[in-house]
Image (tube, rainbow, N blue to C red):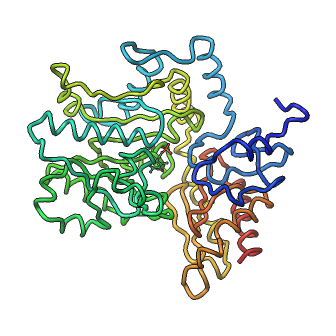
């Protein structure tokens, strides 16, 4: 709790190293925002100011902060135990969660769940499974990965090797592994046969690429990629770290094109945005290839694999989806977001891209040219929005609007109005 005399801002400036942050010139004294409390889609800073959580606390929060039933589930779990090893032991929460996650898919498809900690590790383990599966299925020559330009799959070395955002990874590129990069379905179809024959898997973010400034894929492309995979014996890894758990309007994005991947990576929204927990789902066929002697084992895992608190939060979040009929309420909220963003008519608004409750509003010069990076338009609009009670972040000059699914139409309209005011002030 707040102790008078605590100086979190100063301690932060002196001792913390923030993610993706250039600390030179960052948050000078008195400017740092220390978030101390949340309620529903709202966050409160140390001074008691209230903000709308416009990017769902970096794309994680689903049902709002301090949801009474998720809080209660965590308190109950604390009365049992917080964490026990999943190496050699089971636990009730993980067992039930695995059962529930696989139940979203037809029986005989995604049947197994491997737990890890975050989106990067969910992808990392899919990569290792995909390679070892080939080694143990008589196709050791299939060692390659196909990935999309401008994709983002996380920051650990393996996941980052699949990523296509050069700004993040180019300096480490020679330390990672090589992925064949494509930009479209046409590109994929044009790959040389030798390249395809040595591919273990293709990885993509279904329906919409997040870090690529919120860019939706053409409708139908996902299903086309699935059939391309089937035709060429290449596994499909879907990274639903951002799109999972209702964000696109259905529980999982892949359901919109009736696609079932060979590996499904889940994280961010899995616990409702409460705790770091990730899951990699795969088929019985993949799992079976790891049965046999010791040498066929998947030697991979983390200390906190299947953490009981995390699994309890995830189970509670899934129950909230059912009890509150969350998916049924989404269409009206998705429409409110579309309307609210459409109402921002300033000349610097170049394009609004949206998929469910994921949206990006791209700012450009009136001529259609991008602003120079030095103008920091996106950042400036987001800091202006802060003064109007909206917290979010830009990706370059695209402002992310990704409200928690619990946000009402009125709250979404209010948040869009705040963004509109910020755009007018800065633009
Ligand atoms: C955020 C994200 C990741 C990485 O997840 P972390 O939890 O940050 O490791 C991977 N893929 C996608 C699509 C993401 O949005």
Question: In the image, is residue 183 above or below residue 263?
Answer: below
Question: Could you tell me residue 42's position as x and y percent?
Answer: 73, 46
In the image, what residue occupies the spot 33% across and 60% down?
Answer: 148
Q: Is residue 206 visible?
A: no
As drawn, the residue found furthest toward the bottom would be 367
In the image, what residue occupies the spot 52% across and 63% down?
Answer: 354
In the image, what residue occupies the spot 85% across and 44% down?
Answer: 48
Pick the quarter of the image with the N terminus: top right
Total labels: the figure holds 0
Question: Could you tell me residue 56's position as x and y percent?
Answer: 62, 48
Q: Is residue 266 left or right of residue 32?
A: left
Q: Is residue 224 left or right of residue 23?
A: left
Question: Could you tell me residue 77's position as x and y percent?
Answer: 59, 17
Question: In the image, is residue 417 above or below residue 72?
Answer: below
- Nearest the camera: 149 or 98? 149
Q: Is residue 39 left or right of residue 203?
A: right
In the image, what residue occupies the spot 70% across and 68% down?
Answer: 381
As drawn, the residue found furthest toward the left would be 138
As drawn, the residue found furthest toward the right would be 4
- Nearest the camera: 120 or 263? 120
Question: Could you tell me residue 198's position as x and y percent?
Answer: 14, 52
- Nearest the camera: 317 or 332? 317
Question: In the image, is residue 56 above or below residue 354?
Answer: above
Q: Quadrant of residue 223?
A: bottom left
Q: Quadrant of residue 134?
A: top left
């Amino acid at each position: 709790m707040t102790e008078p005399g605590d100086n979190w801002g100063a301690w932060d400036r002196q001792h913390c190293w923030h993610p993706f942050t250039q600390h030179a010139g960052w948050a000078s004294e008195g400017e740092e925002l220390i978030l101390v409390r949340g309620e529903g889609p709202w966050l409160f800073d140390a001074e008691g100011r209230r903000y709308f959580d416009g990017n769902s606390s970096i794309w994680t929060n689903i049902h709002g902060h301090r949801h009474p039933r998720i809080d209660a589930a965590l308190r109950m779990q604390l009365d049992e135990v917080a964490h026990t090893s999943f190496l050699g032991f089971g636990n009730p929460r993980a067992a039930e969660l695995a059962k529930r996650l696989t139940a979203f898919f037809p029986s005989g498809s995604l049947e197994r769940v491997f737990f890890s900690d975050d989106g990067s590790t969910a992808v990392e383990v899919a990569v290792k499974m995909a390679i070892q599966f080939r080694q143990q299925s008589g196709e050791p020559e299939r060692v390659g990965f196909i990935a999309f330009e401008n994709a983002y799959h996380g920051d650990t070395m393996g996941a980052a090797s699949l990523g296509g955002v050069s700004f993040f990874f180019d300096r480490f590129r020679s330390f990672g592994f090589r992925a064949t990069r494509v930009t479209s379905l046409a590109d994929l179809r044009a790959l040389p046969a030798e390249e395809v024959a040595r591919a273990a898997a293709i990885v993509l973010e279904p329906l919409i690429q997040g870090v690529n400034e919120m860019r939706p894929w053409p409708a139908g492309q996902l299903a086309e990629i699935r059939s391309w995979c089937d035709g060429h014996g290449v596994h499909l890894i879907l990274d639903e770290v951002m799109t999972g758990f209702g964000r696109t309007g259905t529980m999982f994005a892949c359901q919109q094109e009736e696609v079932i991947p060979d590996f499904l990576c889940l994280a961010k929204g899995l616990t409702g945005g409460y705790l770091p927990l990730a899951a990699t789902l795969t088929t019985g066929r993949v799992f079976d290839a790891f049965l046999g002697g010791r040498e066929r084992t998947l030697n991979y895992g983390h200390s906190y694999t299947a953490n009981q608190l995390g699994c309890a939060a995830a189970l509670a979040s899934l129950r909230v989806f059912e009890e509150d009929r969350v998916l049924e309420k989404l269409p009206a909220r998705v429409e409110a977001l579309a309307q609210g963003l459409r109402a921002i008519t300033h000349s610097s608004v170049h394009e609004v891209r949206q998929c469910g409750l994921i949206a990006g509003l791209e700012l450009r010069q009136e001529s259609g040219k991008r602003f120079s990076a030095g103008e920091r338009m996106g950042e400036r609009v987001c800091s202006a929005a802060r003064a109007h009670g909206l917290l979010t972040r830009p990706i370059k000059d695209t402002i992310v609007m990704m409200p928690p699914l619990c946000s009402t139409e009125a709250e979404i309209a209010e948040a869009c109005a705040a963004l509109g005011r910020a755009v007018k002030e800065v633009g």
